[in-house]
Image (cartoon, rainbow, N blue to C red):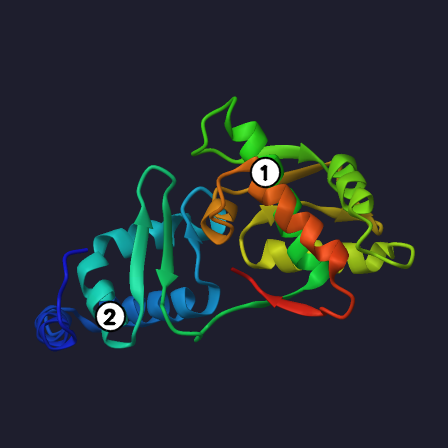
Amino acid sequence: MANITKTAACERFSAIYMTLNETKKNIFARLISKLLTENFIYGQIADDRNDYYAILENKEAIQDFLLMAGFELMHKDTQKIFYLYSETERNRVKLKKLETVLLLILRLEYYKKSKAIDANTNISVDSYDVISELQNTGIMKDKLVKTELIDALKTLKRNKLINFDVTQGEISNIIEIYPTVALIVTTDDITALNARIESYTLKENDDETDED
């Protein structure tokens, strides 16, 4: 998006917003709320498909409104992703250590598999391999509790980084990794990713960390 002042964004937004009927104003408000709440709108999943195209249709007004609120609307066209960026600490998600290490492991798997296939698509990994990699890190001093693992994966799913199913307390064999994971963990180097994972084995009392 070209550089634009908040004043200019306000003027342009006002002009656009006044042309909307009540139905479109309600849609606009819902889209803003969803972006601020969920951050990612991923057009390749069913729940977000219509909203992705609605944001695309109202992109300029949404950009201007969010700019006034201190956010930049980012768009990955080929991956059909909208997300928010801010240089402040607002709206940042806090992840526990288990969630963070899982995220790094999944990012590493995404890195490796995206070299062989189109990186704009979802990538599937065996859940057993992910759990095995987690255990190999040695970050968990006690035995890994299945419910804690499932809860950690659910947090990543809720933030639209992965998809998986749980049936009768068992994780499905396949975990689907979304391209959004590369926007959260921007490191694009296998050595750096391994180093970040290893760094958590040295932390004794680190319960929480920023998402990235």
State yes or no: discs 1 and 2 in contact (Cβ < 8 Å): no
Image location of residue 23, percent across then percent down: 25, 69
- As helix, strand or loop, the secondary structure at mark 2 comes to helix
User: Where is mark 2, residue-wise?
Assistant: 67
Residue under the image location 59 percent in, 44 percent down: 193
The residue sitting at the top extreme is 116
Residue under the image location 36 percent in, 69 percent down: 87
Q: Which mark is in front, 1 or 2?
A: 1
Neighbourhood count class around disc 2 (C-alpha, 10 Å): few under 14, some 14–19, many 20 upward: some
In this image, 61 relative to 130: left or right?
left
Alpha-carbon distance for marks 1 and 2?
A: 36 Å
Viewer can see residue 44:
yes
Which kind of residue does numbered mark 2 sit on? Leu
Which kind of residue does numbered mark 1 sit on? Thr
In this image, 12 relative to 210: left or right?
left
The residue sitting at the right extreme is 143
Report the front residue among 92 and 166.
92
Viewer can see residue 150:
no
Residue under the image location 78 percent in, 46 percent down: 137
Image location of residue 55, percent across then percent down: 29, 56
- As helix, strand or loop, the secondary structure at mark 1 comes to helix
Q: Quadrant of residue 27?
A: bottom left
Residue under the image location 85 percent in, 54 percent down: 146
- Asked if residue 56 is positioned above or below residue 127 in the image, the reply reads below
User: Where is mark 1, residue-wise?
Assistant: 191
In this image, 159 relative to 136: left or right?
left
Which quarter of the image is occupied by the N terminus? bottom left
